[in-house]
Structure formats: C-alpha cells, structure tokens
Image (cartoon, grey):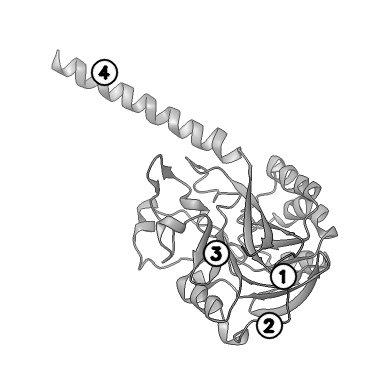
Amino acid sequence: MRKRRVIAAATVLAAAGAATLAYASLYERLKFTLRRFDVPVLAPDAEPLRVLQISDLHMTPNQRLKQDWTASLAALDPDLVLLTGDNLAHPDAVPGVARALEPLFDYPGAFVFGSNDYFGPVLKNPFGYFNKHKVNRPGTALPTEDLRALLTGGGWVDLNNARTTVKAGGRSVELSGVDDPHIELDDYDAVAGPASPDADVRIGVTHAPVLRILDAFEADGFDLITAGHTHGGQVCVPFYGALVTNCDLDRARVKGLHRHGESYLHVSAGMGTSPTAPVRFACPPEASVLTLVPRG
C-alpha cells in the first residue's frame, strides 16, 4: 500500500512538472506584454515624453510572432526608442531583427549592445546563475557589425561608450551609454561627467544593471537609467519573485521602475529567452512605455 502511494505521488508530481514546463515554454514565453510607467523627471508644466524601451530580443530567424509583435509597437507613436541589448541569438538573426525594428526607425532611437550581440548563447547549468563568480564562456561569434549597420542605418544613435544629445518630442534629451558591463566592455571614463543642465531630460543607458555603472550615472546626475539583461529573473516563484538577477543588482529591482539614489532606474524583463533555456514562468516577455512626466 505504501509503495503504491509513493508511486502515485511521484506520478502526480511528474505530471505537474510536465504541465508547468509546457506552460512556461509553449505559452508564457510567447505572452508578449506591454508595461507602462510614469517617470516624474521633467520640469513643471512640461508636456509628457513617451520613451519605448525594447530589450533582450534574443532573436532567431523564424520567430515571426515576436517580430510581428515588436513591429506593432510602432503604433504607439513613441517620441524616443531605446534598445538595451542582447538582440541576437543566432548568426542568421539580423534579418529577423530588421523585420521587427524597421517600422520603429521612423522615430528617434538609440542603442547599446549586450553580450549576445557579440557571441551566441551556450548551454549552461542553470544553477550556475547562483554563482556570483562564474566565468562567462563566449559562444559562436555573431554578426555584430551587420547589426550595428542596420541600427545606425535606421537613424539610431550608437551609445556603446558614447554620449550625445538628441531631439525627441520637441525636447532636448541627453543620452549617455556604455557597452555591456556584464562582459566588461564598458568604458565609463569615455562618457563620464556631469549631466547637462541645459537638456530637458538626461537618460543613462546600459545593458546590464551593474551597480558600479548605475552608481556612476546617478552620481553624474542622470534623471533616468534604463537597462535590461535580467529577464526579470525569467523563472520566478509566485508570491516570492525572482531567484537571481544574473548581476549584482538586488532581486527586489530585477524588473520595473525603482529609485537608484536620486535617479530613477527602469529594468526591462525583456522579450526573449536564450534558445538553450526557452522558458518563462511568472515573468512574461515585455516591452515598456516610460512616460516622462513633470516632477511632483
């Protein structure tokens, strides 16, 4: 009798596990969601400014649903588009990224790269994400320069260790960005210095929300910092949240809008997954509209 109960319990647990995996891989990872946040960083009486943030596409060639949904975001009529890295997951993915983003090239935009704009994903032990000292192994080289040419050819600004001011929504927006600090390609010294008091708003852009970069942007007086990389934890526990952030950011700020000192920080949970771990649970893929509004 006891043996039958153990077998029955194991069968139930196995069925529940299989159902959860099917939900996470076949449904939730394709449940694209638009998040909206108001960010009070503008001067009093200023008109709102709409910033669309897209992150972590991790595109492979035949992901037409993701491409179509991303392209449909052009209907939001954003004032500015920020692309925060990890666009590729396959050597032949640039045409898919083009199909997704070309409708958005009608709007001012800027981008930084993540590690998966340089190297393809590799199969990893998922428990390795709990190791803060793990070594990142590069995968297959990806067509980084083809991607860069696509984005700059669409009129978007390359913010990899660069700083500039753009016009968006009739306003002056200072942008400062770094290449991916997760693989130590950042060079903050190249962009360091106090944010311009003459700009209507000042935004720092990074792929990975690594604390030394967030601290530097905040110290230089940037109103808003945008990042991706974390996937919002990707696999979360209901009523608990993310297990890891894959960087030194605390779990409480793994996604969404939070404060970082005097700055606001928005971390996107992103729109894709690595092909080696194509699941999401309690953390659907997302893009975000950050509506910049007057300070209270």
Q: From the top left corner, tell me how far across and down residue 127 is, in percent.
A: 35, 53
Q: What's the residue type where badge 3 is placed? A: Leu
Lower sequence index among marks 1 and 2: 1
Q: Is residue 152 left or right of residue 15?
A: right
Lower sequence index among marks 3 and 2: 2
Q: What's the residue type where badge 4 is placed? A: Ala
Tell me where residue 94 sits by quadrant: bottom right
Determine crowd level at label 4: few under 14, some 14-19, many 20+ residues with C-alpha closer than 10 A: few
Residue at disc 2, secondary structure: loop
Quadrant position of the C terminus in the picture:
bottom right
Structural distance between the alpha carbons of marks 1 and 2? 31 Å
Q: From the top left corner, tell me how far across and down residue 12 is, in percent.
A: 32, 22
Lower sequence index among marks 1 and 3: 1
State if disc 4 and disc 2 touch (CB < 8 Å): no
Name the residue tied to disc 4.
8
Residue drawn at (42%, 29%) of the image: 18
Name the residue tied to disc 3.
265
Q: Is residue 211 visible?
A: yes
Q: Residue furthest left?
A: 2
Which numbered dot is residue 196?
2
Lower sequence index among marks 2 and 4: 4
Q: From the top left corner, tell me how far across and down residue 267 is, in percent.
A: 55, 59
Q: From the top left corner, tell me how far across and down residue 14 is, in percent.
A: 34, 27
Structural distance between the alpha carbons of marks 4 and 1? 55 Å
Quadrant position of the N terminus in the picture:
top left
Structural distance between the alpha carbons of marks 3 and 4? 48 Å
